Amino acid sequence: MLIQPDAVEFLISRGNGMEFCKKFIKELDTKPLIVSVDFLKRFVKEEKVEEKIKPIERKVAPVVKIDEDGFEILRDITGNSTCEGRLEDFVLLFKDRFEKLSKMLRKRQEMRNAVPIKKVWRSDDEIATIGLVKDVRNAKNGLIVEIEDEEDMISVYVSREIDSAIVNDEVIGVVGKRKGDLLIAKSIVRPELPVEKEKKLTNEEKYIAFISDLHVGSKSFLEDKWEKFIKWINGKSGSERQRKVAEKIEYLIICGDDVEGVGIYPGQEKDLDIEDIYKQYEELADKLSQIPERIKIILQPGNHDAVRPALPQPAFEKELREFFTSSNIEFIGNPCYMKINGITILAYHGQSIQDFASCVPGMNQNEPTKIMKEMLRRRHLAPIYGGISSLAPERKDYLIIDYIPDIFVTGHVHVTAVDSYRGVLMINASAWQSQTDYQRMMNFMPDPGKAVVVNLKNFMPSIVAF
Ligand SMILES: [Fe+2]
């Protein structure tokens, strides 16, 4: 049976989706091919069972020490996926998201006395509550936002002056007062980042370089810029200062879309220089072999790479890894938390930047750091379910930002941008592909052929253009 996304959401909203399915759908003589919301609603009146799903046992994220040079992977889906695409896994995913983000919200001063939604219905005073956003609709001078927790739901009126950037499936705190069936919001509270924390700086000057979206195999791959980059990183070009920086690069993080891929968008064939996906990886491996062996390359997949498209994406499988001859390459998933010399880095290809741009007024995919800030405030990389970026039903939500990174890096939108928010250095790493017709249609305004480098001695970023 196939279950429509709306039907999944309906089941999640009931909080007992698994029991519901067991009781009614499994016992049907004739099972429908596609389960829709309307189909499920036929059974609602008959249903009496209100049993809750037992909470899952939670494990502390393992720290996998990779090498002795101060490089660790803190969290990555690779090898940890539990995804079988089952309905109850979606229920568990959203349950995990709600539990973790509401726990973060409860640490906020305004949310200390937050009550479950069912208690809001019994109160006439100003009250605080927490809910997962189920629906957002426009209303006069504001929004009607439906929020739910494990037991109940309520509609919240949020005037535009208070907040106009609420997105589906994020977890928010609401302070407000009930008026009839509506909770009138006085303020919206996000999990947020704490105030700036102190960074662990290194004694010597050493650098991490960030690039992204190579799209090797595309006709639009910028070969000339790549050759200049290779010359520079080998210390053979640039000013004296730039050469010194290149000599001290210890890590190169590549944030996905490492090759162009095949069948990614309609009509992509005409944009391909290399049509065979394996040959694209062979070419990528050849290009990366030109980087000095002393530099550790950290290679992440993106939506163009040959791994599952749904987030979180695991690292490349063995058959792809075998193309790479260098022993100094680390294959990571998307997203991935890692530690380099005591600096915590969150690397994420950035698929959901487009979802935020299409859902939040005033957001633009060509200004990705503004959107990255919104992700940090929500402590979630991709809250919106059913948008451009698809989510895999893992039992644990790997897209929650529960560790606070020192550096948060994305790619995907082919822009070069650097900014900071509450001490987190945000980087959107540059692409190595010029604008394709498809990107023009999708309003991608590339700023390609650049490397962002960060000095771990003083945490200063700089951009080297090629
Ligand atoms: Fe890309």
Image: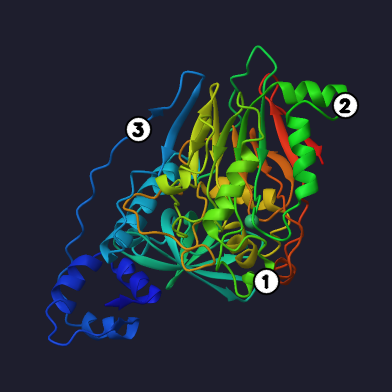
Q: Is residue 219 above or below residue 28?
A: above
Task: From the top left corner, tell me how far across and down residue 218 is, in percent.
Answer: 67, 59
Label 3 Cα crowd, 10 Å radius (few <14 / some 14-19 / many 20+): few
**N-terminal of the two: label 3 or label 1?**
3
Q: Nearer the viewer, mark 3 or mark 1?
A: 1
At x 67% / y 71%, what residue is drawn? 270
Tell which residue pokes out farthest to the right in this image: 239
Q: Quadrant of the C terminus?
A: top right
Disc 2 to disc 3: CB gap under 8 Å: no
Q: Callout 2, which amino acid?
A: Ser
Quarter holding the N terminus? Answer: bottom left
* Residue at the spot of label 2: 239
Judged from the image, the quadrant occupied by ligand 1 is bottom right
Instruction: Give the residue at mark 1.
Output: 270
Image depth: mark 2 or mark 3 in front: 2
Q: Secondary structure at mark 3?
A: loop
Q: Is residue 220 above or below residue 246?
A: below
Q: Secondary structure at mark 1?
A: helix
Q: Residues within 10 Å of mark 1 (few under 14, many from 20)?
A: few
Query: Which quadrant holds residue 286?
Result: top right
* Residue 62 numbered mark, or none: 3
- Quote the CA–CA distance across marks 2 and 3: 43 Å
Chain-order first, disc 2 or disc 3: 3
Whether label 2 lies within 8 Å of ligand 1 gets the answer no
In the visual, does 42 lie left or right of 373?
left
**Residue located 55% across and 21% down the image:** 341
Residue 430 coordinates in the image, percent (x, y):
71, 47
Q: How is the image coloured?
A: rainbow
Most foreground residue, 166 or 450: 450
